[in-house]
Image (cartoon, rainbow, N blue to C red):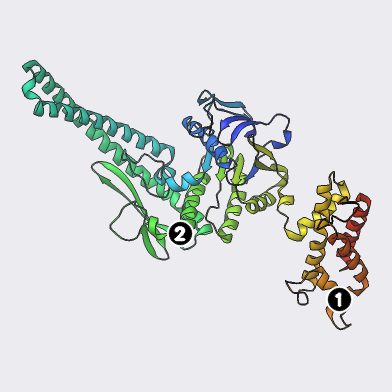
Amino acid sequence: MIKKIIRINNVGKFTNYNSRGYSNCDFKKNTIIYAENGCGKTTLSVALKSLTGRNSLIKKKQSFGTDSGQIFEILSESGVLKYENSKWNVFNKKIEIFDVHFIEDNIYTGSALPDASRTNLFEVVVGEKGIKLKTQIFNLIEEQRNYTSQRRTIKNKLKFEKNQLSKTEIDGLNLQHGFLNEKIATLGQPIIEKSRELGKYSQKVFGKHVEEINNQLKFFTPYIEIKKFSNKSKGGVQFLSYFLTVSGHNIAFERDTKVGPTVKYSLSEGDKSAIALAFFLAKVNMTSKLEERIIVFDDPISSFDHSRRSSTINQLIKLSEKAKQLIVLTHDIYFARDIKNRLKQAETKSLKIINSPASSLIREHDIDAETLSGIFKDISVLKNYIDNGVSSELEKREVIRCIRPIIEGVIRIKFFTDVLPSEWLGDVIGKTRNSVESEPLSRLKPILNDLIEINDYSKSFHHSDPTNPWGDIINDEELRIYVSRTLELIIKI
């Protein structure tokens, strides 16, 4: 389990981050990390992906304006994991990551062709054994291609440079040509056999995965289902081929097809993201020893509407109960709050990446307070002032600024048919003063004097008065009285 990010130097926005002295930024079993765009969220995701065995990824995140050495230091339950001198001191292969690259790289089928170098849904489906077979085929084909390239070079020499060569040189080239022919022919049969083995294995494994994939798809896209699977080969190379059924219509995953519609042009970005997430969740749920895995999600709700957001939260909560650790990075503060509040509070930590001038920082996040909106946020400002006070004139002015919006907001809710959107507290006071007993606003008459006095007090500080001999100084005792009266008035309205 990851316990803390200790230090980051020259990696993305983290030019000089050190957690020393900040014990409140420790990770827990469930860790939710919120960050605005451009603060370093993706940098953390890339670093964790690098930790799985890809040293070169962190190098791609060299901080702008510096070529100094990169350091990324993580405290885990097994000790300190450190990236320095372009490599990790130890890898952690038990981290699974869902990010935008997973969506981009995994939305199409794969094949055992050497140019299909990106990770793809094929690898997600067939697992470690399938990837091993695929790698063996890659290596055999690459070796065969190298021999073919050498043979082509020799053939061109014999064809275009023969008159410049001696008999000894020609005999030597012919000998090499024959040797390469034998090597190419010898590799052909193993490639065919391994490809057939991969085809049989992938079809068998896909049969096990398809039920779980479709089960996950139901949570996000009930009108989409994996329906057709076939294994085919071309030149001894095995392909994995399957289709989606979208509202009863077959949609091919192939990058280029002359038959029917394809995923690339037929599905929305939200649908594509949902399919990729369903594949990832199916893969993770069928992973052996899931209780030993760290599952990382970087913006899992990209392009999702409200219903899919709710489904995502539900699936992540289920996953958190099975996995060793769940880490969710997001730039959607309300998604971060909602999932945090649904997880077991004792096992959950909210963190925030702050973009400071010197370096991005990781700090504890009071996400509930930050996501309070409108009237509730203003009430919290007043309550915090009563409980803890403030230390500056600027903070006092902010307290005063909250008073009138709170009263106006509560009155708008209570008398929603009697107060127009364009009317403010002064208008409400006038309408209350002129109201008759049968009118709803007449119920505010017993507190009319309070409304007038609080309104007069608060509005006097909304604009500077250069003729005021006391300037803009706010008396703390007087402010405390009016704040207390405001809080009491809320109950009476």
Residue at image coords 46%, 54%? 272
Q: Which of marks 2 and 1 is nearer the N terminus?
A: 2
Question: Which image quarter is the C terminus in?
Answer: bottom right
In the rendered structure, the answer to whether residue 394 lies left or right of residue 320 reads right
Residue 112 in picture, x, y percent from top left:
32, 40
Q: Is mark 1 on a helix, strand or loop?
A: helix
Residue 268 is tagged as 2
Q: Do the residues labelled 2 and 1 touch (CB within 8 Å)?
A: no
Q: Which of 432 and 221 is in front in this view?
A: 432
Question: Which image quarter is the N terminus in?
Answer: top right
Residue at image coords 88%, 67%? 451
Toward the front, the furthest residue is: 467
Residue 224 in picture, x, y percent from top left:
45, 60
Residue 491 in picture, x, y percent from top left:
87, 65
Query: Could one spot residue 71 in this view of the protein?
Result: yes
For the residues marked 2 and 1, what is the alpha-carbon distance in whole angstroms? 53 Å
Residue 173 higher or lower than 335, as above or below: above
In the rendered structure, the answer to whether residue 199 lies left or right of residue 167 reads right
Residue 432 is tagged as 1
Residue at image coords 67%, 42%? 351
Q: Which amino acid does label 2 sit on?
A: Ser
Q: Which of 409 and 455 is in front in this view?
A: 455
Residue 314 higher or lower than 127, as above or below: below
In the rendered structure, the answer to whether residue 161 lies left or right of residue 414 reads left
